[in-house]
Image: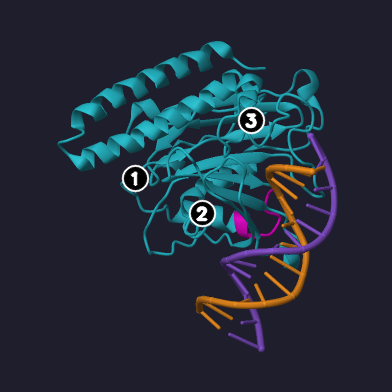
Chain colours: A cyan, B purple, C orange
DNA sequence: ATTATTTGACCCAA
DNA sequence: TTGGGTCAAATAAT
């Protein structure tokens, strides 16, 4: 279920990067505070990636070790077994996890998706609370889409956003269409995305990718035939940011209940992602 | 007046 | 029993 080889390589190079950045940071420390801060941020991101990679290599062991919360695997201790998520009425069978750098600008970019906060909880072992949002149209259109937003422990500028369910109201499709017509403005800060798909006992977690917000949608390709879920990203700005992943859940026990098409909701999601987080991150 | 947020209470699965 | 998710009354914002 887990490809130790490729993930292990990624982990190794990630940790090597951490080491290099740490040394560079040391050299910078009493000269240039701006560069040092930037390095700290990169360092924290890298550590965070390493943790995720390590989790995907050794899910059980690391979870038992009690690492910080706020990660998809941590919220899903049953990964690898049946019922990786709490099955609630009307809950869609796909969970998408997204991390994004905080974007602080007053411009209220409206992607057409409306969320309403309905709760906030302190999470055991996490520095920051987790906020719970539901679709504004839950009652009028019985749309059961929800999401959870939580600031990561490692890097305060990064947020974990977990989407549960899909929009059955019309706004998701409308937002995707709007994003296609008028792509968001490019920002200086890259956005980091992480994709996590869960389906019954099957789980696959992607590598992290970093792409420019103004361009990332260009890399999205629909999945090829014969693969249950497939996405490919290429950042024009950075060849290191190339990402592609194919998921085949057709074999073994993972094949149960395959009545869901991953492609459409996820593509819609990525087409309008950068604006999602404007309001949600403010109070976290 | 209407709509959104806050926050303690409640529910439920582990 | 505990922790996470949701509810709903009070409060704030528009």
Looking at the picture, does residue C14 appear above or below residue A191? below
Picture coordinates of residue A60 (x, y %)?
Answer: 66, 21
Name the element at disc 1.
loop
- Picture quadrant where residue A1 is located: top right
- Picture quadrant where residue A195 is located: top right
Earlier residue among tags 3 and 1: 1
The residue wearing badge 2 is A276
Q: Residues within 10 Å of mark 1 (few under 14, many from 20)?
A: some
Foreground of the two, A172 or A33: A33
Residue drawn 72% across the image and 26% down it = A202
Foreground of the two, A75 or C14: A75
Name the element at disc 3.
strand
A34 relative position to A284: left or right: left
Question: What subunit carries mark 3?
Answer: A
- Dot label at residue A34: none
Q: How many marks?
A: 3
Earlier residue among tags 2 and 3: 3
Name the element at disc 2.
loop
Looking at the picture, does residue A201 appear above or below residue A119? above
Q: Write the start and end of the magenta stretch as one range.
A: A165-172
- Dot label at residue A189: 1
Marks 1 and 2, Cα distance to the nearest angstrom? Answer: 15 Å
- Dot label at residue A229: 3
Residue drawn 70% across the image and 27% down it = A79
A85 relative position to A218: left or right: right
């Amino acid at each position: 279920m887990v490809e130790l080889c490729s993930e292990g390589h990624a982990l190794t190079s990630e940790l090597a990067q951490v080491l290099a950045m740490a040394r560079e940071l040391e050299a910078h420390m009493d000269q240039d505070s701006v560069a040092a801060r930037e390095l700290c941020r990169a360092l924290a991101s890298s550590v965070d990636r390493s943790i995720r990679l390590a989790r995907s290599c050794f899910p059980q062991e690391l979870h038992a070790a009690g690492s910080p919360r706020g990660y998809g695997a941590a919220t899903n201790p049953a990964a690898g077994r049946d019922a990786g998520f709490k099955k609630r009425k009307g809950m869609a069978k796909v969970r998408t996890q997204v991390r994004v750098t905080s974007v602080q600008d007053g411009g209220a970019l409206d992607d057409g998706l409306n969320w309403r906060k309905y709760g906030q909880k302190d999470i055991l072992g996490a520095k920051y609370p987790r906020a719970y949002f539901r679709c504004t149209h839950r009652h009028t259109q019985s749309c059961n889409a929800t999401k959870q937003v939580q600031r990561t422990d490692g890097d305060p500028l990064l947020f974990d956003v977990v989407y549960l369910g899909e929009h059955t109201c019309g706004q998701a499709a409308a937002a995707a269409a709007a994003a296609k017509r008028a792509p968001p403005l490019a920002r200086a800060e890259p956005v980091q995305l992480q994709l996590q798909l869960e389906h019954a006992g099957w789980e696959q977690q992607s590598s992290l990718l970093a792409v420019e917000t103004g361009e990332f949608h260009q890399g999205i390709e629909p999945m090829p035939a014969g693969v249950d879920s497939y996405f490919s990203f290429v950042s024009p700005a950075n060849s290191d940011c190339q990402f592609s992943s194919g998921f085949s859940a057709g074999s073994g026990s993972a094949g149960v209940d395959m009545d869901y098409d991953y492609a459409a909701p996820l593509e819609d999601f990525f087409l309008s992602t950068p604006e999602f987080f404007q309001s949600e991150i403010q109070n976290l």
